[in-house]
Image (cartoon, grey):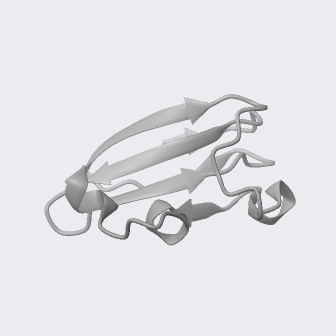
Amino acid sequence: MIAVPDACFDLLFTCNDTSPNAEICATVLQPKKVLSNPSSFYFGVRFYPGEYLINKDIHIKEIIGNTISLKDILETRDIMKKL
């Protein structure tokens, strides 16, 4: 899977038995290969430019090209168990 510069944020869920995860993936400045595991199931939600998903205390410049674990920014730490 390749991420392309599009000014969007993605909420990407990785589902498997051993390490389920959810991450906010910020836009990239250049195409970037996203690692994937063939034994995992992936699905995502796209947020178009102007739709703000993360905490307002985090400046967008700090996360461009990076990912943030959803459990790091939500108060509910057991989010993956609920999903």
Quarter of image, res 50: top right
Left or right of residue 78, residue 18 in this image: left
Q: Position of residue 64 (x, y in %)?
A: 77, 56
Residue at the front extreme, as displayed: 75
Could you say where residue 43 lies in the image, as x and y percent from the top left?
A: 36, 38
Q: Nearer the viewer, residue 37 or 61?
A: 61
Q: Residue at x 55, y 66 (%)?
A: 73
Front residue of this view, candidates 72 and 15: 72
Residue in view at x 51 percent, y 71 percent:
72
Q: Is residue 28 visible?
A: yes
Decide: is 26 above or below 68.
Answer: above
Residue at image coords 59%, 51%: 25
On the picture, is 56 further left or further right than 54? right
Q: Is residue 79 left or right of residue 59?
A: left
Tell me where residue 9 appears, x and y as whole percent. Answer: 65, 41
Q: Is residue 34 visible?
A: no
**Residue occupying the far left of the picture:** 17
Q: Is residue 80 above or below residue 28?
A: below
Q: Is residue 18 above or below residue 40?
A: below
Task: Measuring from the top left, give residue 17's x and y in whole percent.
Answer: 13, 62
Q: How many marks?
A: 0
Q: Quadrant of residue 77?
A: bottom left
